[in-house]
Amino acid sequence: MVPKDGSRRQYLTLIALEPRDGTLSAEVLVSYDPTQAVARRSLGHARECGLIVPAVLQKPAAIFEGLRSDEDEDPRGYGWRCYCGLPEKSYRADGAAAPPYRGQVYLVFIDDEGVAYNWRWERADHDNPTVPLNHATRFKQRLL
């Protein structure tokens, strides 16, 4: 959550596609804390955070709003976005580039204050590999 004093010192700011007008004008904040936690897991996770997350935010294949069900769901639900993309690469634990995971899509979850709070690979829909499995019931609306 962005502090009430408006300070953004503990955040990185990324530019994302604004689905309402198609411009690269949306700001997404990424807290240093989750970024450092990801880096401690593996070099591969750190590369995903630094390379895949910005790419998916800027060139998403789909954007959904209003999470209906997710382990990180806000009880208010509406206003939260999920950016979906098919990265050109994945990264192994040692940081080496590899082909993307077959049958999976990369998701970046953003809360209603513009803070990215989770990002990960998930199983893709069998009929449309650019969106996650069960997307029709998982989100309230598709913006892109």
Image: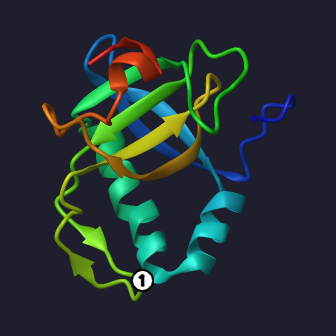
> Which residue is rendered at x = 13% and y = 31% of the image?
127
Q: How is the image coloured?
A: rainbow
Position in image of residue 117 (x %, y %): 61, 44
- Amino acid carrying mark 1 in the image: Ala
Q: Is residue 16 above or below residue 76?
A: below
Pick the quarter of the image with the C terminus: top left
Q: Find the residue positioned furthest to the bottom.
A: 94
In the picture, the quarter occupied by the N terminus is: top right
Q: Is residue 95 left or right of residue 60?
A: right
In which image quadrant can residue 93 be found?
A: bottom left
Kindly identify which residue carries mark 1.
93
Residue at the extreme left = 127
- Residue 92: where, in percent of width, then height? 34, 80
Q: Is residue 10 left or right of residue 65?
A: right
Q: Quadrant of residue 113?
A: top right
The residue nearer to you, when weighing 51 against 140, is 140
